[in-house]
Amino acid sequence: MERLSSSSLCGWLRFKHLTLLTTLAQSRNMHAAARTMHLSQPAASKMLRDLEAYFGFAIFERLPRAMQPTELGEQVIRHAWRLVNDADRLVSDINDLREGGYGQLLIGAISAAAPEILPAAIARLKRQRPRLSVSLQEQTSDQLLAELEYKRLDLVIGRLTHVSQHNLFDFEPLLDEPLRVVVRHDHPLVLSDEAPDLATLSRWPWILHPLTSPMRGVFEAALAEEGVASPNDVVETTSIQATLQLLQTSDMLAVLPRSVLRRPLESGQYVILERVIGKPLDYYGIISRRGEPLSPAAQELIDHLRDLVDSLADDTSALAEDSNAHT
């Protein structure tokens, strides 16, 4: 089989090919894909055959009720999505600039980064670029990294979730995060004289991140280390607001990073139990696509994040020195 080359691919491949692949990957039906693209089904089928002939393998397996991507086809489709999303962003950016806009920055962040450090960095950036359009999406790291890989985000403030991801992304650490158990201020566990062990805590209802998130992984690992079964009364959510509301109206417990708890604790409505769950989460940090230059706006945001983390470290050191001086 003749070896593929990028020069040959660039000379032959068309964006309509990429659109067919992504549309068919979504619908898994040739008739539906052809209709979406305003093509006849024979024309769409021929386009797919041409693609498969060019690559030298089947991209989709023809099943009785659906078209299933093959293993090699999944790789082609993954790159097709990235190219299509890149084209969409090009059109959006050019239209925005032609109409007098000042560009856009699409950021993804985990909940630990969203409460204070990232908003402060965005506020500084907006003072420099008041007409820049900034979009902030808060989710778990695994979901954000999928969006970053497919070029639906410019930058993620989160954690790598697999050892192989260093091949796709650059990572610059910012802060680590101890996890705390939080309940409402008049929860029965707060009124108890004894600090509960993990086995006791696991019998209460919990609000937790999904199993795929690093935070949930730390929680489950802590249970396994002490031989404690996972709670069977669980609400799964990544929403901080929903978590705090559920805590207020129930006897549920939640495990949350320290950074998201400062303001809720100041309100007096919530209390941290004297129990640290597991080891601190690995450092969260700045994640970008490897080998791709950052926009000036993205680079400025990163500079602000670095400055804020440095200031936070200086404040922590000063507090530690004051504490030691008074002991």
Image (cartoon, grey):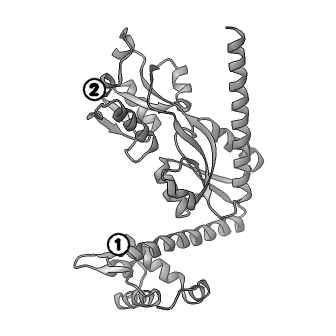
Q: Which amino acid lies under the numbered mark 2 shown in the image of this protein? A: Arg
- Dot 2 falls on a residue whose secondary structure is loop
Q: Give the x, y percent position of residue 285.
A: 61, 45
Residue 276 seen in the current view: yes
**Disc 1 versus disc 2: nearer the observer:** 2
Residue 251 seen in the current view: no
- Label annotation for residue 7: none
Q: How many labels does the image show?
A: 2
Q: Are marks 1 and 2 in contact (CB under 8 Å)?
A: no
- Please tell me which residue is depicted at 38% across the width and 70% down the height of the picture: 26
Judge left or right: residue 55 versus residue 125.
left
- Please tell me which residue is depicted at 71% across the width and 15% down the height of the picture: 322
Is 299 drawn above or below residue 80 in the view shown? above
Q: Give the x, y percent position of residue 214.
A: 46, 43
Nearer to us in this view, 118 or 273: 273
* Residue at the spot of label 2: 203
- Dot 1 falls on a residue whose secondary structure is helix
In this view, the residue farthest toward the right is 128
| Residue 24 falls in image quadrant | bottom left
Is 320 drawn above or below residue 111 in the view shown? above
- Label annotation for residue 27: 1
Nearer to us in this view, 112 or 214: 214
Judge left or right: residue 63 versus residue 276.
left
Q: State which quarter of the image contains the C terminus.
A: top right
- Please tell me which residue is depicted at 51% across the width and 34% down the height of the picture: 280
Judge left or right: residue 247 versus residue 325.
left
Q: Which amino acid lies under the numbered mark 1 shown in the image of this protein? A: Ser
Graded by Cα atoms within 10 Å as few (under 14), some (14 to 19) or many (20 or more), the crowding at tag 1 reads some
